[in-house]
Amino acid sequence: MVAELKHEISQTAYIKLVLHALKHKTTAVNGVLLGRVNPQNDTVVEITDSVPLFHSNLALLPPLEIALIMIEEHYGSKGLGIVGYFHANERFDDAELGIVAKNIGDHICRYFPQAAVFLLDNKKLEALPNGKDQSPVMQLYIRDASKNWKLAGPDGGNRLVIKEPAANVVLSDYISSEKWQDVVDFDDHLDDIKMDWLNPELFK
């Protein structure tokens, strides 16, 4: 069943994660995906929002545990839960899913077995302003029967879709206007609690 799952990500959730990665180009960054299984179709995971987590010390457990608890409390009241994990590697040419990403993905899978891991595809992101590609600038990883993370096969593009077809056009506009400077992650919040990790003003 897991192999047949489709992950549908909203434009807001998608763009927020990519902008977070662009803000911290020289470091690895991560985030979590919020959503639910579609009530009418249990083969579709609807990702409605995302929360940028960290841009330093991604492997430190205490900050991660604090962040996950706060995120679950906030979104749980809205009927949403953590349904996946996003990771962007430090090096532009690094297209491998590393141990930190796998471990956090495994942790999320304990609570949501259909969870996926999205890895930023830097080459697709770089080519974004020049093309008309509507597909996400991310690679989809899912767990196989042996609980190993595997890159979705040739049909992976059908398993990860953006709900709004024009999302990459909007993303390109935000990149041009350097909108990424406004993204707040949990690292920022822990440094200054006045900074809101929910990013309520980001798309206003």
Image (cartoon, grey):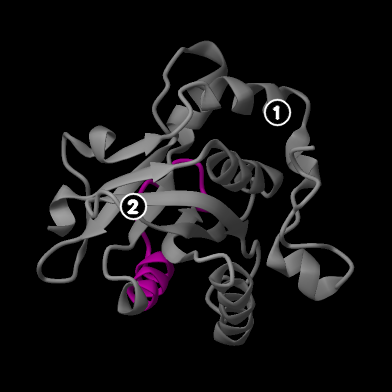
Is 13 placed left or right of 47 in the picture? right
Q: Nearer the viewer, residue 89 or 193?
A: 193
* Residue 76 quadrant: bottom right
Q: Nearer the viewer, residue 56 or 70?
A: 70
Q: Amino acid at mark 1?
A: Tyr
Q: Residue at x 32, y 72 (%)?
A: 109
Quadrant of the frame with the N terminus:
bottom left
Mark 1 element type: helix
What span is colored magenta in the figure? 89-108
Q: Nearer the viewer, residue 76 or 10?
A: 76
Residue 145, image x, y percentages: 10, 67
Q: Which residue is mark 1?
A: 174
Q: Which residue is mark 2?
A: 38
Q: Nearer the viewer, residue 11 or 63?
A: 11
Quadrant of the frame with the C terminus:
top right
Is 170 placed left or right of 183 in the picture? left
